[in-house]
Amino acid sequence: MLRQYELVERVKGYDPKADEALLNRAYVFSMHAHGSQKRASGDPYFSHPIEVAGILTDLRLDDETIATAILHDTIEDTVATPEEILAKFGPSVARMVDGVTKLSKIEAQSENERAAENLRKFLLAMSDDIRVLLVKLADRLHNMRTLKFIKNEEKRRRIARETMDIYAPLAERIGMYEFMKEMQTLAFRELEPEAFESITNRLELLRKGGEDRIAKVSKTLTQLLARNGIDAEISGREKHPYSIWRKMSERHVSLEQLSDITAFRAIVGTEEECYRALGVIHRKWPMVPGRFKDYISTPKRNGYRSLHTSVILAENTRVEIQIRTHEMHAQAEYGLAAHWAYKQDAVRPDTQVSWIRDLVEILDHAGNAEELLEHTRLAMYQDRIFAFTPRGELIQLPKGATPIDFAYAVHTDLGDQSVGAKINGRVVPLRTEIAQGDQVQILRSRAQVPQENWLNFAITGKARAAIRRSLRHKEREENEALGRKLYEEIVQRLPAPVGADGMADALKRLQLPDEAALMDAMARQQLSEAEVIEALMPGTADGAVQDMPPQQYAISIKGLTPGVAYDLAKCCRPIPGDRIVGIRRPGAGIEVHAITCEKLAEVTDADWVDLQWGEKASGGIARINVTLKNEPGALGTIATLIGTHKANILGLRMDDRDTTFHTNTLELEVRDLPHLMRLLAALRATEIVSSAERV
């Protein structure tokens, strides 16, 4: 583990202007925060963030990124808070630490949902500052290096699979091939241990049979280029086990049948020398057809630039040769991170690349966890081809892409309105596969909308996400229209119109966010007609109110001596369901009051009796205040509604009236408290009722 002064010296070695105090504060803070925590290996937990920071110093990253690496686990794994990080290290470091902080395990979710949620939040964070991605990749790389210490096999395999599916492709996308190769090798060893061992053993045997082969070819290349006036650094290496295994799987061949498991690299001084060296090599040895790629004139989306060719040496041996400059080599090994070493003044730390913007757009379009993972993997995995717009703009696409993928790559609106295409001037269907170097023109119509069958031949994550989003939107519109029609049929049968407040209360009862969601649920038959009616006007649905007629009501009270006379207090009008108490005065019977009655505060000369309603208690008179809009027929409407709920109006008094509203006090014979509450809810849901409250 790097000591504090060693880490600072590393950073100052490539960046003399680095903030030494910031690095020292971060080191001490993280060490104290993690305290005595241990990793699965038995090492102090603090060693992990320091090793991550050390990995990033090899990339020559700035002091804020190194500080973020040191602090990246403090918020989740210690008592440190985001506010502390902000106060001690500033907004930039605090924002990055928040973005890199590992997300808590999401319980009771499938593996796909958990991975999708982690990926969603991570991509949004890194779109704000790409350094978040660099720290996260270094964090994952060190975790993979120590994966063997985790005893739970299922957990090891889950981490390895997530690394293979998400983090290695992300490293490749920003050109960090060394990170990618090591992650893939470590994940491959965990996921396919037998295949890994078989390939590494066979490579060892091949090495023993030709120990000096790489040295001989390297020497030959060096001498060949030198004789032609080109000073080049030549190195040779075997391809890593996962790359070999993937080629064996794709080509259905054995390792011995692979002819290009060895690759050589020639690093020269200038771009011009790259092309000169290529010419010299092709004059010396025959080129393997179809194996030449010029990534200097047409770089990969991650900025990778190099010339690739395969040639046939003596004894029919094939080798791959890559030719690049020193700067191209740094970009190839460390990708976006190389900008800090070569172009610190020219490139802002929050530089974004186009594919990240595509991924963030995919986040907005994905409907669920499965779609998000599918679209993101499509955006990160596939090999690329190059096609051109009629104006000569270069568009990169995965192999097998069609004009519909091309259209969405140019602009979402163009994709939505596609009706056909011209490839190299010839009209073709949208399902036609685009070849390398094709010129593609999209034919569009503003009347067009995305079609479901496009999903059969659209292969890019961006296109599939946009098509699915459009189809979902269209389905929602159709469902809303159908649901609205069903809703209008229902409200016509209600005893009174439903107002805005009534609708708001109904949505709360149904736990729906808005009217559109209600209409959609009705169209999908997720709600029955009775459920909707009951939510709009509680107690109105057929069979929902089983109230007895008023003449069948019967009062039953526990806690009284049989035969003792009692009266229900007229001040509070208690009904079954209210909490009650009895008041016994000398020479008089017992008055039954609701426990909340204000008159009880004035009682000083009486005994209190604890009472309860009997099990079959029903019937009582409740007093309510109802404020109505001053419209013709308003009283008739609420009278009908009250009758629908099987309550009886015993008295009505108009208390106040103006040009807009009038307030009335009603005495109602009801069954019990729930009966009254349902009636009040139905009144409040009615459009002409401004308020309805129990007195």
Image: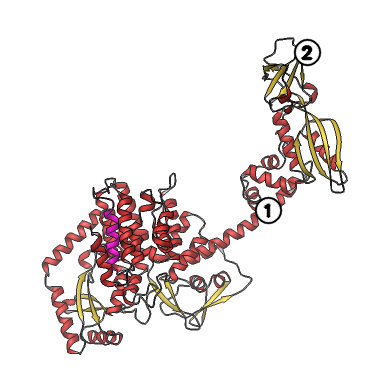
> Measured along the vertical axis of the image, is residue 187 above or below residue 592?
below
- What x and y, as percent, mark residue 382? 39, 67
Q: Position of residue 425 (x, y in %)?
A: 51, 83
> What residue would you read off at disc 1?
482
Which residue is found at the position 53% from the left and 72% from the top? 411
Task: Read off the magenta span.
Answer: 38-60
Q: Is residue 187 visible?
A: no
Q: Residue at x 82, y 43 (%)?
A: 628
Q: Is residue 315 above or below residue 54?
A: below
Marks 2 and 1 sit apart, C-alpha to C-alpha, by 65 Å
Inspect this view and state whether residue 205 appears: yes
Q: Compared to 363, does 230 lie above or below?
A: below
**Residue 677 quadrant:** top right
Could you say which is closer to the camera, residue 310 or residue 656? 656
Q: Residues within 10 Å of mark 1 (few under 14, many from 20)?
A: some
Question: Residue at 44% of width from left, 47% of height from top?
Answer: 109
Query: Which amino acid is tagged 1?
Result: Leu
Label 2 or label 1, whichever lies nearer to me, is 2
The amino acid on which the numbered mark 2 sits, given as a three-letter code, is Ala
